[in-house]
Amino acid sequence: MYLPIIATFLMTCLTITAPLHATFVKPNLESMNIKRFYEYPGPKTWLLSFPTSGNTWTRYSIEATSGIPTLSNIFAPGEKFLPINCPLGFSFPSLRTDVTKRPIWKVHRPGEMLTVCQYDTQHDTLILLLRNYKEEVGRYNNPISHKVFQPYFANLALFDTWNPDKKIMILYEDLITNPKETLTRLLEFLGESTEFVDEFIENIEQHRKECLQIYQIQGNNPYSRGSDILFHSKKLTPQRRKLVDKEVSASYPNLWKKYLKDLYSEEVIESKGLYS
């Protein structure tokens, strides 16, 4: 008489514990033959971004729409073999990852590029993924002078010296609020077809859920706040945000005037009503 009850209980447990999406496959290092990506001839393509700037979502979007494999140097000192550091197509077979294509190397600072090879500012391709620096201040609650933010400005300084014909800046905010136009612009810059962008956008919420799995499986916080591009900045008082602007303009006057002021100054953000 208890069998139906037990069966119902077991089915309930299975339903609760089953993953929301069963698309993730844990990759095997040996079967991936990662070293082939290091041996790809010719100039490199780099995706450079400060941590927590949306680089995993950017990589996922690139692989899903173009097939270009993206990875970081898993053989670098102190680096770990994690699914997030390998081409995401090995974890998500539904992606269009084509391992015969020239890979994109994900790095968080210029020094990481040197663990792969000597980068070439004239012939290599550079994608700089940039996010509002006040989002990082709000998240870490450190002054902009803190050493944790040094790579942010080092990345931007390197971008400034790069061959203009071989670089593109992608804003995290554009990728979240206007993904179709942003991905189209990125793929056209890379010389890739944009034929799969519309399909990707139609299923973007499903893709986002799948991309978050890689964080969840590793036990990491994905920091996803939906479409609120100022989530962390709102933790700061208006006075603090203006003070951060002042610190950045004083410490990095050239980068501030050339890139940051018109994008992220409080004057610009408030004029657009983005805090409301």
Image (tube, rainbow, N blue to C red):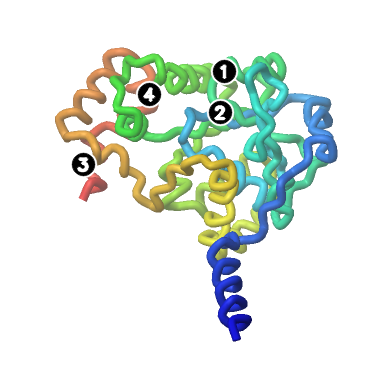
Inter-mark Cα distance, 1 to 2: 8 Å
Q: Which residue is mark 4?
A: 258
The residue lying at 71 percent from left, 46 percent from top is 26
Where the N terminus falls, by quadrant?
bottom right
Q: In terms of sequence position, does the residue under pointer 4 or pointer 3 come before the other?
A: 4
Instruction: For the residues labelled 4 and 3, say whether their Cβ atoms are less than 8 Å apart.
Output: no
Q: Which residue is mark 1?
A: 110
Q: Quadrant of residue 109?
A: top right
Q: Quadrant of residue 113?
A: top right
Whether 53 is drawn above or below 97: the answer is above
Q: In terms of sequence position, does the residue under pointer 1 or pointer 2 come before the other?
A: 2
Whether 229 is drawn above or below 152: the answer is below
The residue lying at 66 percent from left, 35 percent from top is 82
Q: In terms of sequence position, does the residue under pointer 4 or pointer 2 come before the other?
A: 2
Residue 48: numbered disc? 2
Instruction: For the residues labelled 1 and 2, say whether their Cβ atoms are less than 8 Å apart.
Output: yes
Q: Secondary structure at mark 1?
A: helix
The residue lying at 73 percent from left, 35 percent from top is 103
Instruction: For the residues labelled 3 and 2, say whether their Cβ atoms are less than 8 Å apart.
Output: no
Query: Which amino acid, by three-letter code, is at mark 1?
Result: Pro
Q: Nearer the viewer, mark 4 or mark 1?
A: 1
Q: Secondary structure at mark 4?
A: helix
Q: Which residue is mark 3?
A: 270
Instruction: For the residues labelled 4 and 1, say whether their Cβ atoms are less than 8 Å apart.
Output: no
Question: x%, y% of residue 70?
Answer: 68, 38
Question: x%, y% of residue 235?
Answer: 24, 38
